[in-house]
Amino acid sequence: VYVMTEVAKREGEKVINTDADLLDVDSEVKFLKVNTMACNDEDITELELSVYKNLKELIVGKNALQYVVGLELKGLASLERVEIGAGSFSKGTDGVFEVAECEALETISIDDGCFPHCSVVLFRDLPSLKKLTLGKDVFCGDEIGETRLVMKNLEALSEFTGRVRALKNVKEVQLDSIPNLEKCVLLTAFKCV
């Protein structure tokens, strides 16, 4: 499979094109982009981002990091935007997806087929999060597993949408302190609640 190589275009940006690029990310990075189809070795099952305290933007292209089991974005005070392309994080099982304590985070967009087998999904203590968008089959789980969703202390969240089968087989849901939610469209969520 041919992956088009891309270079950083702005100061503080790192573009990940190959597995080796994961080893060469400056701790002061502000904009991190994982290219489409990058880092799909089945031995790459973890991605540690907590060391990037200045990270403002995380963009993951389509079908990248497929074997990474879960994702934790916690305590990244400068993070403003997270965008994950279709098919990324799609082959790991029983992982945890957590976005928490990221004071500046305003938007999260996760496209079709990402994190289908996460057992725990947490969005908490995100005071600036305004928009959360989930594509088809995101966090869909399965009828046998015990998938849990926690959304807590999301004071600015006004729009939460999920396409077909997003959150479909979640068994336990905790929603707390989401006072400004105006639009919530989840087409086939919570079949098992």
Image (cartoon, helix red, strand yellow):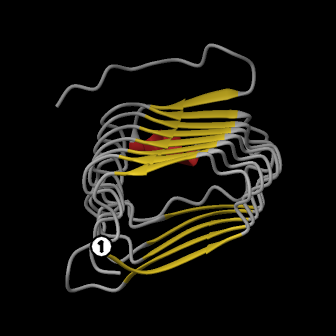
The amino acid sitting under disc 1 is Thr
Residue where numbered disc 1 is placed: 93
Residue 27 percent across, percent down from the top left: 75, 46
Residue 191 vs 9, above or below: the answer is below
Residue 83 vs 50, above or below: the answer is above
Residue 172: in sight, yes or no? yes
Residue 5 percent across, percent down from the top left: 39, 20
Residue 44 vs 156, above or below: the answer is below
Residue 25: in sight, yes or no? no
| Quadrant (top left, top right, bottom left, bottom right) of the N terminus | top left
Residue at (45%, 46%) from the top-left corner? 161
Is residue 33 left or right of 141 when viewed as pictured?
A: right
| Quadrant (top left, top right, bottom left, bottom right) of the C terminus | bottom left
Residue 148 placement: quadrant: bottom left
Is residue 112 left or right of 60 when viewed as pictured?
A: left
Residue 126 placement: quadrant: bottom right
Residue 32 percent across, percent down from the top left: 60, 35
Residue 17 placement: quadrant: top left
187 or 6, nearer to the observer? 187
